[in-house]
Image (cartoon, rainbow, N blue to C red):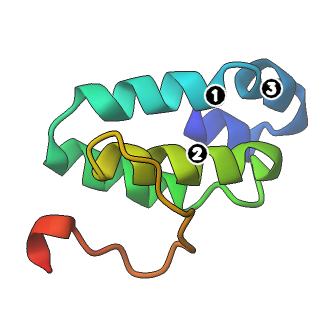
Amino acid sequence: MDSVSKKVGRIYHAVFSRDLVQTFLSCFEAVEKPVRDRMIKVLKTWPAVYKDQYAALEAGVARIQNGGVAAAPQQWGPMVSPSAE
């Protein structure tokens, strides 16, 4: 999905973006930390591709990382794992 969105573009954005937030966050919640870290790296490349969904993705990732507690959306800078702080 990531590659198709970036290389083929617009025609797939409407299809992928419909369920993007729910799909990404469901997967993010189901996997272990090493996979989450890789998913965050991919997500950090999406602001221009999925700008309408990016804030919801960002907030959802923050909520999941905080154990389900809603958190203020963060700006994606260098990602630091909560366990590494």
N-terminal label among 2 and 1 = 1
Instruction: Characterize the local packing of mark 2: few (<14), some (14-19) or many (20 or more) Cα atoms within 10 angstroms.
Output: many
Image position, residue 29 (x, y; %): 31, 31
74 shown above or below 39:
below
Q: How many marks?
A: 3
N-terminal label among 2 and 3 = 3
Label 3 – label 1 distance at C-alpha: 12 Å
Image position, residue 62 (x, y; %): 43, 54
- Judge from the rendering whether residue 76 lies leftward or rightward of residue 55; answer left or right: left
Give yes or no for contact between labels 2 and 1 (Cβ–Cβ under 8 Å): yes
Label 2 – label 1 distance at C-alpha: 9 Å
Instruction: Check the picture and name the quadrant holding the N terminus.
Output: top right
Image position, residue 37 (x, y; %): 27, 55
Q: Amino acid at mark 3?
A: Tyr
Q: Residue at x 76, y 20 (%)?
A: 18
Q: Residue at x 52, y 22 (%)?
A: 23
Foreground disc of the pair 3, 1: 1
Would you name the residue on which mark 3 appears?
A: 12
Would you name the residue on which mark 2 appears?
A: 57
Instruction: Check the picture and name the quadrant holding the C terminus.
Output: bottom left
Would you name the residue on which mark 1 appears?
A: 20
Label 2 – label 3 distance at C-alpha: 18 Å
